[in-house]
Image (spheres, rainbow, N blue to C red):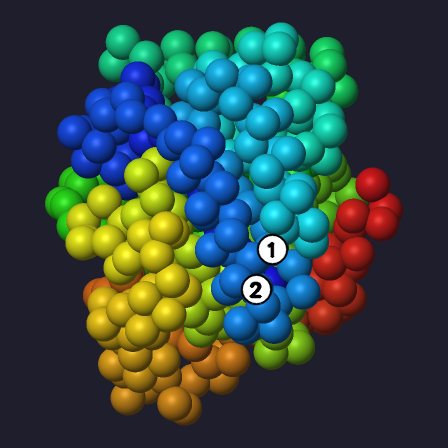
Amino acid sequence: MLSVYLKPTNYCAINCDHCYLPLPTRQNKDRMSLSTLQNTAKFLAQMMEKFKHQHCHIIWHGGEPLNMPTDWYWQAGEILDKIIPNHSESMQTSLLAFRQDIVELVHQRFASELGSSMDFSLRKLNNEAHLYQQRWLDKVKLARSEKIEIIPGVVPGKQDINHAEKIVSWFIKHQFMQFNFERFNSFGQILPDRPSNKQHAHFLTSLFDNLMSRFKNNKPTPLVGIITSAIRGVLYQNPGDRWGGRCQSDFIVIEPDGSLNNCPDKSSFEKPMSNSNQSTNKFISAPLRRQWIQIQTLTHKTPDCADCNYYNWCKSGCPITPHEEECAGYYSFLNHIKHFSKQPDGLNYLEGYLNLRKLQ
């Protein structure tokens, strides 16, 4: 599957300190034109044909994608349907710009779901995290009243790494039984709130322990993507989450002006690999793209990677995450799951958690 981060605007007024976009980028109010979108759709259709992809998933991203007029998305949808019949769409939003006129669009084009960021210590209004959380919950309530499901994504900062239980309890309290956690990356800039690999692995381990404790004691237990992915990696050697060694070849990021990259975290800090109004060969053969594919498949690996029991899961991890203190695949976290699986009934609990969706 071809995965596309389509950014109609980079503008966002929230100005979170940990944002992967530098401040000048997220202050830029330029918008993607429909002619650029049409070029983009043709480009993606050609990429699908060239690489024999049967499906293309488009993630409307940003910036804040809800800063675009709703009518623009309806017109964009007509273009995409005509040129790329085999595609699906979703949207990742802060949700603070959610409004009534977007409801029908979400139902018809985004499967009645929205992905939304809830980063506990990192997102603030007037320098207060609780104000952001309350505003966000108000928007969640509005979305739920329209039968729209919100799937939260969390980027844990340094202040969050010892509070996995508190975060899980907060989500359960507010009736979220499905969410995910993403790595805090800081490509091209120094962000002091970014946890080290070791700290992130500690957080994931605490998260796993909390979820397994809940599950074993028949308490409400949410499904967390990174945990189900890690369990499948440890038990069945399945490639993990968005890792598994292909994001630099199978991901495309498209900026409002049609500029192309293969990673949203890198896109604002590198020269464009090409533009969607150019031939697919221009993008495929771009030296920078080929360099990053080589980094992912070869040079990001350490000598320990070849002998690691979890290499099939992470393929050395995210290529922009350095191997600092601990590997970018978070070996101690995965090893913790392996040890758990060898405890009495541990394997049954892990497999039961994987089947949790069927039980809810």
Viewer can see residue 115: no
- The residue wearing badge 1 is 56
Is residue 14 visible in the rendered image? The answer is yes
Could you say whether the residue bearing mark 2 is in a helix, strand or loop? helix
Quarter of the N terminus within the rendering: bottom right
Question: How far across and how far down the image is residue 11, in percent?
Answer: 31, 25
The CA span between labels 1 and 2 is: 7 Å
Q: Is 315 on the left-hand or right-hand side of 111? A: left
Mark 1 / mark 2, whichever is N-terminal: 2
Residue at the spot x=60%, y=42% of the render? 80
Kindly give the residue lying farthest to the right in the view shown.
359
Q: Where does the image place residue 4, in percent across and percent down from the top left?
A: 49, 51
Instruction: State whether residue 344 is above or below residue 164.
Output: below
Among the 4 quarters of the image, the one containing residue 114 = top right
Residue 132: image location, x then y, percent: 40, 15
- Measuring from the top left, give residue 141's x and y in whole percent: 64, 12
For the point 27% across and 69% down, the residue is: 286
Task: Identify the residue at horizontal 60%, vertical 55% (top origin).
Answer: 56
Towards the viewer: 224 or 259: 259
Q: Amino acid at mark 1?
A: Cys
Q: Which mark identifies residue 264?
A: none
User: Do callouts 1 and 2 mark residues in contact (Cβ within 8 Å)?
Assistant: yes
The residue that mark 2 highlights is: 48
Category of crowding for the residue at label 1, using alpha-carbon neighbours closer than 10 angstroms: few (below 14), some (14–19), many (at least 20)? many
Quarter holding residue 287: bottom left
Label 2 crowding class (10 Å Cα cut-off): few <14, some 14-19, many 20+?
some
Q: Nearer the viewer, residue 304 or 5?
A: 5
Amino acid at dot 2: Met
Q: Is residue 141 left or right of residue 64?
A: right
User: Does residue 17 sit above or below 89 in this rendering?
Assistant: above
